[in-house]
Amino acid sequence: MSNEDKYEPVTRARRENSLWLTEEQSDGLRLSLRVTETIFSKKTQYQDILIVDTTEYGRTLVLDGAIQLTERDEFCYSEMMAHVPLCSHPMPRRVLIVGGGDGAILREVLRHPCVECCTLIDIDKDVTLASEKYLPFASAAFFDQRADVRHADALSYLETTNERFDVVIVDSTDPVDFAAGLFQSPFYEDIKRVLKKDGIMTELTESPFSDTALMKQAIGQMRSVFPVVKMYWGAVPTYPSGMWTYGAASLSPDPGKPVRSIEGTRYYSEEVHGASFVLPPFLRDLIR
Amino acid sequence: MSNEDKYEPVTRARRENSLWLTEEQSDGLRLSLRVTETIFSKKTQYQDILIVDTTEYGRTLVLDGAIQLTERDEFCYSEMMAHVPLCSHPMPRRVLIVGGGDGAILREVLRHPCVECCTLIDIDKDVTLASEKYLPFASAAFFDQRADVRHADALSYLETTNERFDVVIVDSTDPVDFAAGLFQSPFYEDIKRVLKKDGIMTELTESPFSDTALMKQAIGQMRSVFPVVKMYWGAVPTYPSGMWTYGAASLSPDPGKPVRSIEGTRYYSEEVHGASFVLPPFLRDLIR
């Protein structure tokens, strides 16, 4: 059976736009997007993959019921995950993405001409295959010669690899099941080990309104491992609360100070980079 | 009949937390909050008022089906509406709030000791009465001697009044029905007329993801009237998309440059003030 057969759309529910995708973002909060068509659905060894078309946010990737990216607002997230560490690093040549199997962050990383190779390690090959077929806006960079896409357990890889990186970007799903270890100090120790001199890592740290505990834990554990840890934030409409935080840790460079620039971005700019590290007092106090 | 009788809770639906408040933020986007109790509900001459308790965002005021404020995140909005213009003005003594009948922005305005009088004109007295009784976190400032609360049509007032103000804050509901005129140049001309030298106005300008047309229209109309117009933005989780924009217009001061400070805020700070005027490129381009 060819891939072509395996990835045919499984449903084509067009019910006069009365179908809604509802994410239970937390016990008391739900976000719903009106769906025009179910494009792809598959239960893999690791998770449920769902791709739908929505009226407001375009094509949308959902993993285990949680919206991962939408065509309309993923640039808010992808650009801030990629360009903040890359533009703070004096010369990023080798980059590692943990997770990110849809390819959107890879696409942003490879916009930097100085990057010679970007390794992406996602546990679920089906996400990559589905993205190649149904999310071309995210997956185009898979075909870049500098892309090194592997399907494996990134935690095991990090424990044993001899490869070294200038920047590591952790684009995990929510911290449950196989992703639970991605916000804890042993994981950060492994990342520190694979970072070269001047190395920087970034990771999503959820919303201060929806997952405060995880946010505080992740920043606290980063601080126990790295000499420099800072938080930045930005808007991502389809993530819980729309106010999204990121942790940036480094061996020496200040991730809040851009030293390089990138053209053609829609959310990121040198000025946005600096401004995103200005935390409202309630957020600054939460991670004090 | 006393006010006490009129404002008794009308429903007490406690259905094992299975009740949800769902706002259709746009045709294809819904936000739902789990409700524990309906506190107050009244159909007035102007709108439907609903106050509920929610598990995630606390007590919540809803007007005509649109969430106006929640106990948990209203500070994000109220502080940015009040402190950006007040901290940019050399000496704000007299302030006008158009709308804002719940009192949350009034509360922030009156934290500035230099403010001698803050006039609030909201068309719907029932909102103020309900807030006094059920939203004490928002309405406490009604009892401040410097608060001058009136119930009238602010548009008519602005056309005829001889009163003058240092700062005008427009906290309207969505631009339909009686609020439709609040985003158009004749309204801005009237505001300009009641502003003193160095006067500044601010108004919500909706979300770049949910109401782009209104946002562009409001900024465009402000530019046709005021010599200085700038946009700033911030997070407000329970407003559409969570990414909220504000228009600031002035007769001369730069609303992006704080010249005074305020203590004890949770979202606003002098640094946040500056950072909130840094627009992501896609937003800057939308209002070019």
Image: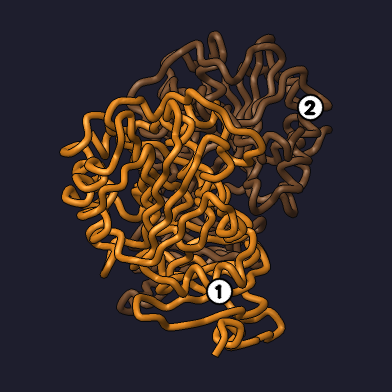
Chain colours: A orange, B brown
Name which quarter of the figure residue A178 lies in. Answer: bottom left
| Chain name for mark 1 | A
C-alpha span from label 2 to label 1: 42 Å
Q: Amino acid at mark 2?
A: Arg
Instruction: Determine crowd level at label 1: few under 14, some 14-19, many 20+ residues with C-alpha closer than 10 A.
Output: many
Task: Note whether A114 is above or below B32 in the view shown.
Answer: above
| Chain name for mark 2 | B
Mark 1 residue element? strand
Q: Number of callouts in the render?
A: 2
Instruction: Determine crowd level at label 2: few under 14, some 14-19, many 20+ residues with C-alpha closer than 10 A.
Output: some
Residue extending farthest bottom: A1
Between B172 and B220, the one lying in front of the other is B220
The answer to whether marks 2 and 1 sit on the same chain is: no
Q: Residue at x 47, y 82 (%)?
A: A42
The image shows residue B105 at horizontal and vertical percentages of 49, 35
The image shows residue A257 at horizontal and vertical percentages of 43, 24
Q: Are marks 2 and 1 in contact (CB under 8 Å)?
A: no
Whether residue B38 is visible, yes or no, is: no
Name which quarter of the figure residue A157 lies in. Answer: bottom left
Q: Residue at x 44, y 53 (%)?
A: A241
Residue at image mark 2: B223
Task: Note whether A148 is above or below A45 in the view shown.
Answer: above
Between B169 and A172, the one lying in front of the other is A172
Quadrant for the C terminus of chain A, please.
top left
Mark 2 residue element? helix
Q: Amino acid at mark 1?
A: Ile
The image shows residue A148 at horizontal and vertical percentages of 46, 55
Residue at image mark 1: A51
